[in-house]
Image (cartoon, rainbow, N blue to C red):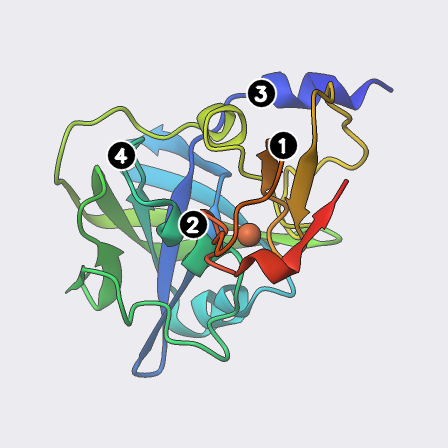
Amino acid sequence: MNNKILRDLSYGVYIVGSKDKNKNVGCVVNTAVQITSSPVTIAISINHDNYTNKCIKASNIFSISILNEKNDNFLIGTFGFSSSKDTDKYKNVEYEEISGCPVIKNTNGYIVCKVISILETETHTIFVGEAIAMNKYMDENPMTYKYYHEVLKGSSPKKAPTYIENITEEIKGNRWKCTICGYIYEGDTLPDNFICPICGQPREVFVKI
Ligand code: FE
């Protein structure tokens, strides 16, 4: 099986928000799809080990904030590479609460859904939700998964539904890899005081590959 074909499936990049009692939680998701138009029904896929998964099951509500190409990488770093269990991911993020669910400002907009069905797979839960609120903030190019990989040089955590093992790309020059998020830096030397543009960790977490 040539798993490279999987990269030809198109996806966006989204931040899914939900509630843990009074605390706001969330994570990065790239599998969100509109299933029907009337009523608007959306499906997302989230790993069983992800804290947000548990919170959606308890609160029966989730939001999708649709990222665009101008959104800061730190949004993906904050929501994609740490757990809501230990951190308040919304601490340094502009957001508002819509129908009791956090949505991120400065994105293209949001869809808030109530859960109407749940399907379990071996590793992930598929949540199907009916939209109860949606709005557009701006009209930038939506961030695609391809853009995230190829332009931002971002990678996927192992828990992502579309994680692919062992994809090797052409190596030119020196490369360093962030051991936290997988971001690859290319260049002669890794600059002093370098900070990972995706997850915000210092140069010490980088290894030469
Ligand atoms: Fe990183």
Question: Mark 4 sits on what residue?
Answer: 70
Q: Quadrant of residue 79?
A: bottom left
Figure quadrant of the N terminus: top right
Q: Amino acid at mark 3?
A: Leu
Q: Identify the mark nearer the N-term, 3 or 4.
A: 3
Observer-side mark, 1 or 4, equals 1
Separation (CA) of disc 3 from disc 4? 23 Å
Q: In this rendering, is residue 204 above or below 159?
A: below
Seen as rendered, the residue at the extreme right is: 1
Helix, strand or loop at disc 3?
A: loop
Q: Position of residue 207 (x, y in %)?
A: 72, 50
Question: Mark 1 sits on what residue?
Answer: 188
Q: Amino acid at mark 2?
A: Ile
Question: Mark 3 sits on what residue?
Answer: 9
Mark 2 and mark 4 in contact (Cβ < 8 Å)? no
| Pointer 1 residue Cβ closer than 8 Å to ligand 1 | no
Q: Which mark is residue 82?
A: none
Q: In this rendering, is residue 28 above or below 43?
A: below
Helix, strand or loop at disc 2?
A: helix
Taking the spot 54% from the left edge, 55% from the top edge, the residue there is: 118
Separation (CA) of disc 3 from disc 2? 21 Å
Separation (CA) of disc 1 from disc 2? 26 Å
Observer-side mark, 3 or 1, equals 1
Using residue 58 as the reference point, say whether residue 206 is left or right of it: right
Q: Position of residue 108 (x, y in %)?
A: 21, 37
